Image (spheres, rainbow, N blue to C red):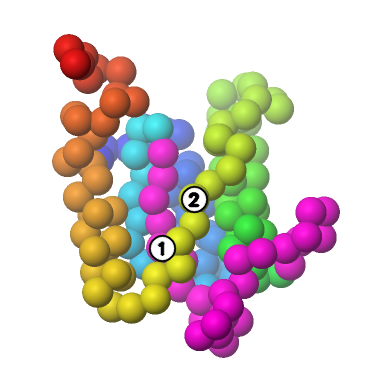
Amino acid sequence: MQLNDLGRIVADEWLKTADIRPEIGLDAWVVMPNHFHGIVVMINGRGTARRAPTTEQFGKPVAGSIPTIIRSFKSAATKRINEFRHTPGMPVWQRNYYEHIIRNETSLAKIREYIINNPQQWELDRENPTNIRTD
């Protein structure tokens, strides 16, 4: 995937996510034309075998939780993209996101492979505007 200016902003903000948060690390990730995939690795024991920090109450962010990390990443990327495009306040991302707790090495390997191979699947993506489907 060759990134344009907006894609480079997203990539830069994703890398900053781990730089400013010592409680996480980044694993495989990719910026796609219409979406983003990334694996966040929890460090310092924030998550446990029974519960990862994936929930919070509305209006009460929990530092180091997945929702807070993703919200901050999306917010920072949106701000920079809108500054670049001169479109203050314009939405950039879908409202929510999909999260999944990776519980074992087999699952991690499959998800990494999916992320790494995702750019090769772009031609088949139904959201790809150049993909004309006849079915």
Q: Is residue 125 left or right of residue 18?
A: left
Q: Which residue is mark 2?
A: 98
**x, y percent for residue 21:** 59, 71
Does dot 1 land on a helix, a strand or a loop? strand
In the image, what residue occupies the spot 45% across and 73% down? 41
Magenta segment range?
35-62
Q: Is residue 51 left or right of residue 63?
A: left
Query: Nearest the camera: 18 or 55?
Result: 55
In the image, what residue occupies the spot 64% across and 51% down? 71
- Which quadrant would the C terminus be assigned to in this image? top left
Of mark 1 and mark 2, the one earlier in the sequence is 1
Q: Which residue is mark 1?
A: 39
User: Measured along the vertical axis of the image, is residue 91 above or below residue 133?
Assistant: below
Q: Amino acid at mark 2?
A: Tyr
Give the number of callouts: 2
**x, y percent for residue 35:** 41, 39
In the image, what residue occupies the spot 19% across and 29% down? 123
Q: Is residue 76 visible?
A: no
Q: Is residue 37 left or right of residue 59?
A: left
